Image (cartoon, rainbow, N blue to C red):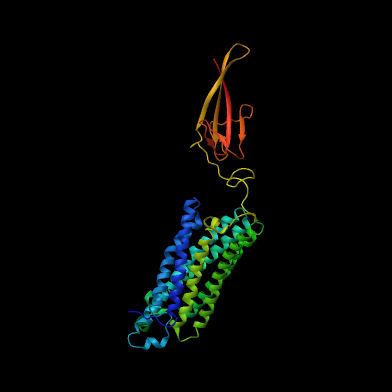
Amino acid sequence: MTIFLDDAPHLTGTVITLIILGYLTFGMRVYCRVTRASWGMEDSLMAVSMVPFAVLSISCLVASFNGVGIHAFRFQQPGNEKYMESGLFWFFMFEVFYCITIIPIKLSIGYMLVRIAQNRKGYIYSQYAIMVMFTTMNLIAALYIIFQCMPVSAAWDSKLMAEGTHCRDPAILADIYYATTAVNIFTDWATALMPIPLLWNVKLNRNAKVSVAAILGLGIFASLSACIRLKYTVNLTNSDDYLFGLCNIVIWGYAENGVGVFVGNISTLRPLFRKMLSLGGSNDSSKPTGYGASAPGIPSKLHHPYQSFDDYEMEPGTSGTNSDGVTTTTQTRTCKIRGGSPSEDSFGSETDSQKKIVRSGSVSGKNGGTMSPGIVVSRQIEISR
């Protein structure tokens, strides 16, 4: 039996939406990286983050059915008293795994920027400093949340609190909340804005610029999620409707992680969407003339009577006697070139070969039939005997 009222459905909808987007884009990321043999450190870190992200998602979902987001007066109704304690437990799980999950997610994005920066040491060292900063702060917060009470279960068990179990001053935990949120906001903005100078002089077409701007905008949205969460955290200290107020903190805290997963994954899917969305060119021109495009005067599709590069015909030759009295036989050897690439039997110089490019019409075959337009290479071989 569960309690699913007030703001709890909003929490459920947020979690379901972001977990679908997160794992869907992660699966696409794995496919893209594996098929292109480009797996890197950032991909391993994102794969690691999927485990605590799953625990975080489950904790938030279960919390929405067990008291988080419910007004205080409902817990006074018969049968609802137990949800007060269960709501506090699942919020405790959210706090711990929020700090644990965000570390590999942001490290993955950071290492991706390090790869983009290549040999620009200033950007690389700055990114390493940012990674050390948020990793240290979130680890401190996670450890303090876990061990703020002895035993640990006193953080959600009201009976233990009534027995005089020792917990540290809540003001210290609030200060750690503020410090951690401030560090996460700063590092989110720094990470979101750092690609701008890296890509400033890169020539991109309009579609590519739009895609980069969209990804940067999503990264900033993750930072805005932390700002909104901080607002609700401050307001919670002056509220008597504790579990109801926790709902917005959980929603925006989970959104910060979920958007981080989505942004980190979608930024690697450019090769997968390039054909579909026409991304990644250096200019806005249309399809170039070259391989796969027809030049003026040459048919776009060539139908060849030969099945491989090695097919050829030795036509009957003609005999004669040269000035030295030696009898010679001349034979013509013809091979078809498919796709503009010579076969192993083609010839390297024009002195011993005659190349005929047929631009229109048809070519007579040896049995009176016709061959479609194409490229024919002929060579005469003199055999002395």
How many discs mark residues in the rendered view?
0
Viewer-proximal residue among 30 and 287? 287
Report the residue that reaches farthest toward the top: 325
Position of residue 361 measured from the top left corner of the image (x, y, whole percent): 59, 39
Q: Does 189 sit above or below residue 85?
A: above
Q: Does 35 sit above or below residue 86?
A: above
Asked whether residue 151 is in view, the answer is no
**Left or right of residue 174, residue 286 in this image:** right
Position of residue 166 measured from the top left corner of the image (x, y, whole percent): 40, 79
**Left or right of residue 69, residue 200 in this image:** right
Position of residue 13 measured from the top left corner of the image (x, y, whole percent): 44, 74
Q: Does 85 sit above or below residue 108?
A: below
The quadrant of the rendering that contains the C terminus is top right
Quarter of image, res 210: bottom right
Quarter of image, res 204: bottom right
The quadrant of the rendering that contains the N terminus is bottom left
Viewer-proximal residue among 54 and 376? 376
**Left or right of residue 350, residue 161 in this image:** left
Q: Does 252 sit above or below residue 278?
A: below
**Left or right of residue 143, residue 211 in this image:** right
Report the residue that reaches farthest toward the front: 368
Viewer-proximal residue among 256 and 28? 28
Asked whether residue 326 is in view, the answer is yes
Viewer-proximal residue among 210 and 1? 210
Position of residue 216 measured from the top left corner of the image (x, y, whole percent): 58, 65
